Structure formats: C-alpha cells, structure tokens
Image (tube, rainbow, N blue to C red):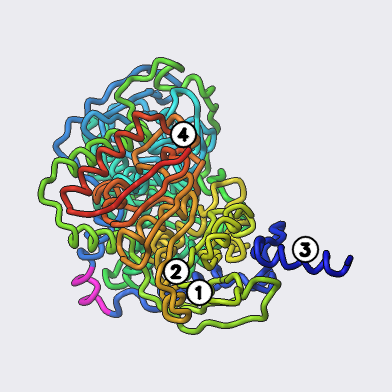
Amino acid sequence: MRKLIINLCLLFISIYLPHSFSQNKLPDVFSQDNENDIIAQTLKFEAAKAFEILQVSSNKTNWLKNRNDLKVKIIEKAKVSFYPDLPLKYKATKTQMLQNYTVKNIYFQTRPNVYATANLYIPNGEGPFPGVVVMMGHSRSGKLYDIYQSLGHTLAKNGYVSLNIDPWGAGERSTNDGDFEYHGSNLGASLMNVGETLMGMQITDNMRAVDLLCSLPYVDSDKIGATGASGGGNQTMWLAAIDERVNAAIPVVSVGTFQSYIMNSNCVCETLIDGLTFTEESSVLGLIAPRALKICNGQKDSNAAFYPQEMLRSYKGAQAIYKYYDAEDNLSNQIFDTPHGYFPEIREAMLGWLDLHLKNIGDGTSKKETDFNLLPESELMVFSKGKRDSNITTTAEICLDKGVHLKKNILLNKGLILQDKREELRMMLKIPETNLLQAHKLTDSGNWERFILETTGGELIPVLLHATNKRSAEYVIICNAEGKDKISEEIIENELNKNRGVCIIDLWGLGENISIDAKRIDGNLPNFHTLSRSALWLGKTTQGIWINQLDIVSKWLSNSFNVQNISINANREVAIASLLFSALENKINKLNLEDLPLSYLFDNDGDIDYFSMAIHIPDILKWGDLSLAAALSNKHITIINPVSISGRKLDEEEVMSFNNEFNYFNTSLRQNTSISFSP
C-alpha cells in the first residue's frame, strides 16, 4: 500500500506539475572563467584592425585631397553647430583688480538664447595681447578648480588674455543652480537621443569662445592659443582641428590613440560617434598642421588611454603630416614625470611654447612660472547660488526642449511611409550584419539543454532551452537586463505551464555574457558606460547588437526546432531592444515588456541612472519615438509597469498620451498592433 501511494504521488507530480523545479540558480552555460572576456577581446581586436586600416595618407597629394572631407565628417558625426553671425551678448557680473591683471566673471551667448559662464583673465596694459581659450577637464566645479584657475592666473601674468570657459553641463552650467555635477554618463549621453553630442556642444562653445576673444579690442585675433588637460586637452585637439583661427594648441594628458579608448575609461564628451570607422587620432592631430602643436603627457598617468606609448603612436602619424608642410618644428611632444593633471612644470612648458609661437620670443623651452595667489571659488562664480540667469541653459533643458520639438514634428508629418521608417530605424540602430556560424551543444543540466551560439562576428550567446519530451511549436525567449539569474521562477513556470518551450539567453554584456573588464572600468559609473562608448566608436549601438542577437536566436529556434510561434519576455533596456526588433521583423508574435520606458523624452523627475547607458540611441527622437516603434511591430504588446526614461512610474495621463500617439501611428500606417497595460 505504501509503495502504491508513493507511485500515485509521483504520477500526480509528473502529470500536474510537470515543470516544477528549483529556480534558485539557473545552470551556467559558460565556463565562468573570468579570464575569458570574449567581449573585451573582440572589441580590442576590432579597434586594433581599425588602427591599421586608418593610417594617415601616404603622401601630401592624398592628404590634401582628403583633409577637408575628414573635417566635414568629424563635424557631421560630432554634430557641431556654427553661429558666426550670432551676437555674443557678452556680460560681466564682477571685476577684480589683482596685481598686474584683472579677472572678470562673465557669461556670453554660444547658441541662440544659450549662454556659457566663464572667467576672463586680462593683463594690465593696452595690448593687444595674444588670447588663449582654456578648456576644463572633468572637475565638477569647472573653471573654479584650482588647477584650471592656475592656468588663468599664470597666463595673465605672462601677457596673455585667458578665457576659462565652463564645459557644457559642468561648473555653473549644471542641472541645478549651484549643485556641481559630472556632465557625462547618462546625462551627457542623453544629448545623443535628440541628435546632439556632448563633444559637439563643447566644440561649438569653444569656437564661440574664440569668437569672443577675437571680438575684444585688447586681444590680437591673429594670435589665438588653446590648452586644457584631460577632457580639456581633448577639447583642445578638437577645437584646433576644426577652427583654424587657433594658432597654437597644447593638449595635456589627453592624447593617446582612438584604439586605446576602446575598453578604457573615457567620458562621453570624448566619444566621436563612428569615429573608428573613418579616422584615427593621428589624422585629427594632422588637421592642426602646419599650426603649432605641443602634446604633453604624464609618465605616471593611470589612464591607459593616455599612456605616453599610445601618444607616441599618434605622434608618429601626425609627424608625417607635418612633414608634408615642412613644418616639423611646429610639432613637439614632451613626457613629464607626473600623474594625470596639469602640473606646474607642464604650465611652464606651455608658457615657453606659447611665447615662441604667439609672441615670437624665446626658443620654445620651458619658462619659469612666477608666483600667484588662487582666488576662493566664490570669487570666481558668475552668479551667486540661486541667482543664475535663466539663459544659462542646461543639458536637461536642451534635451527636453529639443525632444518635445522633435516629437511634435513627427506627429505633424502626414507622409510617414511604413517601409521607409523601418529602413531609417535599421540604419539608425547600426545593426551588425552577423549571422549564426555554429550552434554548439553542451551537456544537459537537469531540465535544461545548454547551447552556445557562435556568430560570424565572433560573439558567443549562451542559451538555455527547457528540455521536454515533446518539442513545442511555441517558444518564449526570456531575457533580463540584469542577467538570467534575475529572472523570476514565476515567469518561467507560467510559460512552461502553458506548454510553451522556454529559451533563456544572456545578451551581449549581460549576465554570463558580461565583460569583467568593462564592469571594472565602469566602477561607480552606470553600467555599460564602457561598452556603449566602445560600441559607438566602432560604428555600433548596444541596442543594435542586442537586436542582432535576438534575430540570430529566433532564426535558430525556427530553423533548428521548427518553432512556429515565438514571443519575447524582457525588461528594462532589453525590453526596448525587443520592441525595436519586433518593429523591424515579423518573426515575433507577442511581446511581454516590463519596466519599458514609453518615451525617450528627457525626464528630470526620476533617477537619471535608472537605466544603464545601453539605452541611448543617437538620433532616436529625430526618427520618432517608442510609440512609433510599437505601431510598427504589428504584434500584441503587453507592457507591465510603464515608466519614464528616468524610471519614474507614469501616471494615467502620461500613459494615455502614449496611447494617443500610438493609435495615431497605428492608424496612419495601417497597422494592426494592439497594446495592453498591466501595473
């Protein structure tokens, strides 16, 4: 009798609870050997190939032929704007008379109704004096930081007008008046969603700084210099490459190779979209030729992107270009026994170089710096806290205002064509053209079959399939933005109990597919800070990579297991990729999307770092928005807990607004998409 009861219990479990299993931890697919960072190795290999391919022109004729095209391409990709006829409307809020020079706290117009804060350090006397644009690195306080104000003091004491400009989004240009913040990460990257870049905003600002210097009666407009350290050194290079009014440039602890930027720690303001598809740093430095260029690096720099050996690789290429102009004497490099920063010995080298090339005195060697006293930060503030002029426009304001304008234009466009919008979306996402190379079957683990899908692009996709006695014609692909181990048991059980096959994947950079190097480099920055920037440099987007992998997995399921119906269950950033994938393809039958943002419109009321940097897509709001993407999918979509781009839970009115947009596109494009919402 006891044996019969046990057998009946086992029979009951096998019939009525066929899919019950412990979900504490799904089985691993990869070996979990942290040394095998396939993603980092692949990206570095692509960057190494680009360095070899993107060599400088081999002769002067080719260089002169291609030089202007390179500059135009940089302007296009960095989204640089030009306002040569826009009034500067320069205003001073405070003037301080110091020994031998004056400091003015100023603001001036860099774009229509957009103003930058700055300090002007002016030598005593009639002039005209050479002028120098000093660009800040990544101090949150911008021009107030002692290293940067030191440059202003020492330049003025040596007969130069120094214009120290707050970088876009830093110093007094931060989101909240007086609360200094880091201008990069998700904040700076949000500019890409509205068709701008942080790099381009800064180049435009800095060209306007040159405009201002040239407009001042006490500045010699034929003698303009530029300098800065780290991010400011990067700005120095880009400004001098684009604006030929800069006669002498000194980028400090910022020159390496673009190859070295891949899988290293750099800011969004140092990211040129698609950069490594058309140029390397040596050619950008070459755009400054034959004008004076002195590159300074620190032997003890901790950032591998700026190691002296990387700088020397770019210097060698730039040297060849300077030779085309017989201007080798105008190019120099110097390596200091210092860490990352603009130290006194580097300032002295800068003074000697500027004296030679802007004043025609000395031999270009270091000039001894005389003593000066730093001013308290409060003395250099253009506005006292809480009294900032409303024209000091922030990143948040630009993103929101331009986003609203772009969305309005799309809704007013009565001529949208379905296939055109799909093709535009495909091009914008820069989806890799990689396919399945081989599916590697590993040993099963419990109820799970384990596979590694190897792509023609060198990526590996770990896959778990729930093993059943009978293959189902319907499968659900489940992926989680934090990796497969964050998938709830309830989600898997619900699908299995509906007799659906379950396919669990970790997409590029997630879960088992994580890049250990990228995670280490990101540190306290948002996830995908390193991977998203590396992808952008190489002509990709994270969303495009994920869409390609979803395509590979869905085709594999269909072709290898004769799966007829495929749905996707995804959350957060991966939910966006799933929605966009369905907008492009007809392979997916249904979507269940959790924590999906309903719009890319900037939202300053939530947590700007709620989503990782994998979310950003250059020009997405110029194309449309997620309401348009949903209409293009022509599927049934269930959205669970809809949120804003900053993770804020949306109210009924905001959901209704999305629905109205969606219904408009669904009707005008003659689609049959349906959407339901769940808390």
Type of secondary structure dominating the magenta stretch: helix
Identify residue for label 3.
Answer: 9
Q: Hey, what amino acid is under mark 3? A: Cys
Which range is magenta? 59-66
Circle 4 sits on which residue?
Answer: 649
Mark 2 and mark 4: Cα distance apart in space: 29 Å
Assess disc 3: are there few (<14), some (14-19) or many (≥20) residues with their C-alpha within 10 Å of its C-alpha. few
Q: Nearer the viewer, residue 261 or 40?
A: 40
* Residue corresponding to mark 2: 549
Q: CA distance from mark 1 to mark 2?
A: 9 Å
Distance Cα–Cα, label 2 vs label 3: 42 Å
The disc, 2 or 3, on the residue closer to the chain's N-terminal end is 3
- Decide: is 240 above or below 16: above
Frontmost of labels 2 and 3 is: 3
Task: Name the residue type under label 4.
Answer: Lys
Q: Which x, y percent locates residue 513?
A: 58, 66
Q: Which mark is residue 459?
A: 1
Q: Please, what is the three-letter code of the amino acid marked with disc 1?
A: Glu
